[in-house]
Amino acid sequence: MTIHIGAAPGDIAETVLMPGDPYRAKWAAETFLQDARLVNEVRGMLGYTGTWNGHRVTIQGSGMGMPSLSIYANELIRDFGAKTLIRIGSCGGMQDKVKVRDVILAMTASTVNSPSSGIFRELNFAPCADWGLLQAAAQAASKHGSATHIGGIYSSDVFYDERPDLNEQMVRHGILGVEMEAAELYTLAARHGCRALAVLTVSDHLGTGEALPSDQRERSFGDMVEIALEAAFS
Ligand code: HPA
């Protein structure tokens, strides 16, 4: 039991999927895991542990933004022994070739700032995904037939951003999409010798303003869960 995770020792699997939304954690656990049971409900940030094809898996909400994810990922790694952490979430598309519903596998995650920025001082650390997970997720995504993009994303501190000039530079430098958590997850995984990856569905597009209708979000989210599970245990 930690400050933010009420699970008993041994309740958390070494492999953890982390959606931002705790209700997505509930839905994914009930839909994809066998014998899923609730292991955390502190602050309503639901976490479930069950099995997938015989492998133990925890699906734990991270909340929105890097400060929130950082709390859960730190406790999962340091107190519960998590070794593989896969973010499953949505992002805003930033390139013309990236369409709503496409999947993005984040090879790197650029930031302006993160909870870890303080320790790097003048260094621009480059948070990157675990190569084995990335490769396995790319294979799983192609099997699913999802249109998939692999490359850099931007982990922003704000959803309602006021820096069109910054977005313009990122588009110019090939950044595929924007979300709010992956850079801190990758940095923590690097610090603690864990494997991390972000599997993202494009839910909206910054250029076109198109957005995924809510009735189609569930299916896209389901594809991501399957890609993440297949990657974790391939
Ligand atoms: N910005 C930041 N995070 C997001 C977005 C966005 O446009 N879409 C989904 N997550």
Image (spheres, helix red, strand yellow):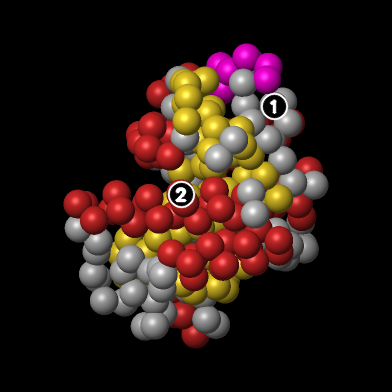
Residue that numbered label 1 is attached to: 80
The amino acid at mark 1 is Phe
Measure the alpha-carbon separation of dots 2 and 1: 22 Å
113 or 8: nearer the eye?
8
What stretch of residues is rendered in magenta? Answer: 4-10
| Most frequent secondary structure within the magenta stretch | loop
Query: Which corner quadrant holds the C terminus?
Result: bottom right
Q: Assess whether residue 98 is covered by the magenta stretch.
A: no
Residue that numbered label 2 is attached to: 225
Q: Is residue 60 left or right of residue 207?
A: right
Q: Position of residue 19 (x, y in %)?
A: 46, 43
Q: Quadrant of residue 8?
A: top right
| Helix, strand or loop under label 2 | helix
| Helix, strand or loop under label 1 | loop
* Residue occupying image coordinates x 56% and y 67%: 138
The amino acid at mark 2 is Val
